Amino acid sequence: MNVRQWAADLMLGVRFAFTGGREGWTRAVLTAVGVGLGVALLLLTTALPNALTVRHDREAARSDVTFSGEEVPKANDTLVIAKVDSNFREDSVRGRALEPEGPRAPLPPGVDKFPAKGEMVVSPALKELLESDSGALLRERLSDRIVGTISESGLIGSAELAFYQGAEGLAPHIQSGTIERIDRFGDPEPTSEQSDPVLLLLILVVFVVLLMPVAIFIATAVRFGGEQRDRRLAALRLVGSDSSMTRRIAAGEALAGAVLGLVFGAGFFMVGRQFAGTTEVFHISVFPSYLNPSPLLALLVAVAVPAAAVLVTLFALRGVVIEPLGVVRAGRPRRRRLWWRLLLPLAGLAMLFPMVGNGRENGDFNQYLVTGGVVLLLFGVTALLPWIVETVVGRLGSGGVSWQLAVRRLQLSSGTAASMVNGIAVAVAGAIAMQMLFSGVDAYYTRSTGQDVSRAQMEVTLPEGTSVETSAQKFRDTEGVRAVYAISEGYLGDSAKDAEWNTQLTVGDCATLRELANLPSCRDGDVFAVHGSQWDPSLDDGKMAEPGRKLYMDPSDVGEPKSLEIPWTVPQDLKAAKPRPGLVDEDMDQGGFLMTPKAMPDAFAPALDGRAYLKLDQSTPDVQDHVRNTAADIGPLVDTMTWAETERADRYDAIRTGLFVGATCVLALIGASLLVSQLEQLRERKKLLSALVAFGTRRRTLSLSVLWQTAIPIMLGLLLASAVGLTLGTVLLKMSNTPVVVDWTGVLSMTGIGAAVVLVVTLCSLPPLVRLMRPEGLRTE
Amino acid sequence: MSIGHTLLGLLESGPRHGYDLKRAFDEKFGHDRPLHYGQVYSTMSRLLKNGLVVVDGVETGGGPERKRYAITDDGITDVQRWLGTPEKPEPYLQSTLYTKVVLALLTRRDATEVLDTQRSEHLRSMRILTDRKRKGDLADQLICDHALFHLEADLRWLELTAARLDKLREAVAR
Amino acid sequence: MTPPAGSLLSAEQLRKAYGPTLALDGAEFSIHPGEVVAVMGPSGSGKSTLLHCLAGIVTPDSGTITYNGHELSAMSDAQRSALRRSEFGFVFQFGQLVPELTCVENVALPLRLNGTPRKAAERTALSWMERLEVGDLRKKRPGEVSGGQGQRVAVARSLVTSPRVLFADEPTGALDSLNGERVMELLTEAARSTNAAVVLVTHEARVAAYSDREIVVRDGKSRDMERAV
């Protein structure tokens, strides 16, 4: 056996694949699409680590406000930078104000010229947003003239919203964490990439789950060669090719599909890469250029996939004897045994089990264990399904004629029936598990706060030097704001320095204070002490609410520069107040002293920070952004925060949609091949069908029997898929330390898609079935 | 059929009277046509003359004298030779049917009619044979089958000729 | 033209074309209860088409078919299907047994299509199989029995509903002569015992010899030999 002979045989097979008539190339194209999807996924898998690294490196290269507290003296190579991040709708906007202090001030990555005051450079995504109608509200806030765009090297994703604006007079406000002076961009101590283990787990599972059904599809497509291929192979034997030559020719046909699939795969990957540049998942978007598979891995894929196709065919043909007079499939094997079939999913579970409870704190998940476990568990579906179908079908009792016809056929060929639906079952099982994992992890990322946000939905922090009253008025005038609860806060200690007890002082008008605590009565000039607060029990514990006791506003801490240390005596007419659930968080019930404006000594003013809680009319569109615009109007450093029960619900929808599309594509592909096989089988039975119709069988009966024939195995397959999917989902969620929630709509919709595919396949095979049932089929000529 | 050889063969199992021979012959082979006594005696006297049988004994009783015949060694050899010699297949080259068809064509009569009538007649014979076969024993079945296959062969010829009548008409007209 | 008196099934002036091919061109037919009529003719002469038309499987382009006083072409497809289920029986050359069903289930199939409960249907089926000397095959599948046995099973199936007309299209075509004759004997015997009419399409004279009379189809035209003589 030499190489040339092998090559010649394979090439002959390749020729047959494309000259084998309509079925021949339909099969080749379907196989190619399947292989193509697989290849594209593999390429994406090899490219993804690279993408994450690039993202990480770019992020490190532009890091600026580092909280390092390190003082850099002003020089001609320094830059004062202020963090002016914002939010627009659900997206965060990265913003920096830049004030170069000399000609050699460092330029941020991706920016080639400093914007002057009143100018800004923006990311392409932000530019597009600002120029669109939907960005009009943001435009109010970011009204600087756009003088350029940030190039790719300064961004970590194609969808990132970012801007650099020019500023003046920042230096006096330098404060660690917000406004800093820097002499270079980039993290001085770059950390090695530390990706979220759960995110990696997600990615891993997604690829395994998408690749498995594709692999099974390919294996199945290769095995069901169809009658025509059988005849061809038998004819080859008749003219003298030996058994192994014939096998190689058959493998050549599979090779054709696989090679064509490589081409398809490269195409899919290029398309997917571009598409990847326009999507965002979990706030992560990438540039197409990030997705460059390493050449070595790509080469490996290009060699391994066709080789695998050949090997799978040779393996699949083991049970097939190709004789000169016809192809004999290995006779019905011994009764299927259960134990080793159960062993596969159990082994899978055993591999995953040690990682239960790992969560994201314990480092990366062992990739081999995860992959192995998921693969084994899903493979368990393909191992268990034939057994289940055989066992169940063997016990199915009598029914109508259509039922009997279908059941008997299934009994005779339960293996074929099971392998036809294997791919669908695995796809559905994987999709269910994935959806559970996604929804669970997504819920983790957004985390339901359990907050009562009916009283206030936004919180605004006002920097020092901003008038609380003026600001409050501006917010009251903002569209969609129903109420503003403005307060000033500071801290009181029981001594001027190194206070043992500290408590909070909150200044606000009676209406506001009533929102914070249950007051017996309130007049301007009153001071209250809140007793019994769970969140801030300092007043009770520190025994500070005793009239006449001397306390100090803004006490100094050890080792810190001296603060204001304004002395204050607890007044005699101190009133007692009871806590009430916090404005934005039930658990954060207000403690400490409450003070009406008249009771506040003027000296306190510089020691107080302003804050406002806003009650919004949620029906006003983009109400949050109206508030953010007002805040920006008050000052660039006014920080807004949105409180919500849950966030990003729509983001989960997007993922669910994506998952749906992906699963549907895989299922549609499998459905298409199912249809081809189905039609082939029907055509083989043309004579029988015509005869049955001749002696008066209703067409409905035959159609129903075709439906049963696919419906019974698919039903069993979907049941098994649901069970395995839910198990896998539960284990994965437990691994990521996320509460287990079963998303029944997801389960139902996934199984629904699976069932729909079968229904569509059956419906599509009905018109040809009716055509085959015509009496013309009886004609022997 | 060679009656002489058949009678000789029947004698191989032991000497018989002429009457016995006729009965045995009729029973085994004479389904359609029983032998006449005269035929038996003339045949036997020929065999006697040729030395293939001998008279084993003569019974004289009330009626006519009855000779008992026995086969000689020469007779046995002769039977052996007869069985070993293949029958010459019938040449079937002179066929009345063919003549009828050609004549019909030449006289511009309907040749199909000739064929169909013949075919109908053949089939009627086949029906009778089939019916007899159904009711008869194995011997009947084999004999009828022999006839049926021949009739069938004729029928196939009729079919074939019917399908080629147009060509035949051309050939005849030339 | 009225159907011949006393005929169970008759056809007049049947015409049927498949595309450009004229399969039937004015064919006639008639059969009495209990009669076995052979339809003969060279292959491609339209004899199978005649059978399909007579059985209501195919609708002729023109002409009338009368069964038991009813005009067949006036019936709906469902009615004709019902007629085939209950009044007609069919035997074909091959490809008619459902390979997944056991022999007895195959024989019981027409009864079950008529709504007979499974047990009762299979009991009747078995008695027919015994009559056709294949009772011991009941648990076997068609793939496990010989051609002759399979054809007897098919004959049993065609008779299980006690049809009034039995349509047999080359019923012995795939059998050797011994098996073929046995099948023909059993078939005609059973048909006669139930007084069923048999329409027997064949190109073999020896099979046609089991008939009472024959009709020759040639180029889509029929010729009733008995009436012609």
Image (cartoon, rainbow, N blue to C red):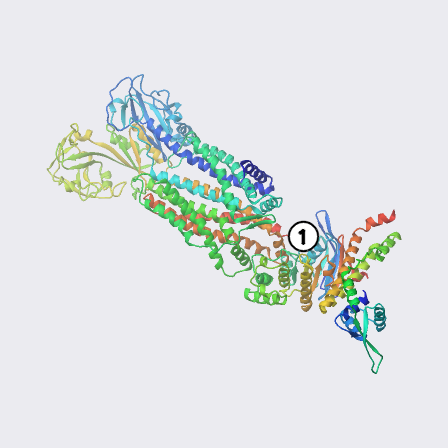
- Looking at the picture, which amino acid does disc 1 mark? Arg
Instruction: Identify which residue, A614 or A343, lies in the foreground.
Output: A343
Q: Is residue A122 left or right of residue A532?
A: right
Q: Residue furthest front?
A: B73
**On-image quarter of the C terminus of chain C:** bottom right
Rendered location of residue B29, percent (x, y): 77, 68
Q: Is residue A22 left or right of residue A606?
A: right
Does residue A435 show up? no
Does residue A707 show up? yes
Q: Residue furthest bottom?
A: B62
Rendered location of residue B147, percent (x, y): 77, 62
Q: Is residue A452 above or below residue A58?
A: below
> What residue sits right under mark 1 in the picture?
A779
Instruction: Identify which residue, A398 or C126, lies in the foreground.
Output: C126
Residue C140 quadrant: bottom right
Q: Is residue A576 left or right of residue A207?
A: left
Count of picture labels: 1
Instruction: Identify which residue, A192 or A129, lies in the foreground.
Output: A192
Q: Is residue C26 above or below residue A557?
A: below
Task: Name the chain under label 1.
Answer: A
Residue A570 quadrant: top left
Q: Secondary structure at mark 1?
A: loop
Q: Residue furthest right?
A: B107
**On-image quarter of the N terminus of chain C:** bottom right
Instruction: Identify which residue, B69 or C69, lies in the foreground.
Output: B69
Rendered location of residue A630, percent (x, y): 32, 31
Q: Is residue B36 above or below residue A356?
A: below
What crowding class fits label 1: few (fewer than 14 Cα within 10 Å), some (14-19), or many (20 or more)? few
Instruction: Give me the residue at 78% from left, 74% from top.
Output: B16
Rendered location of residue B23, percent (x, y): 78, 73
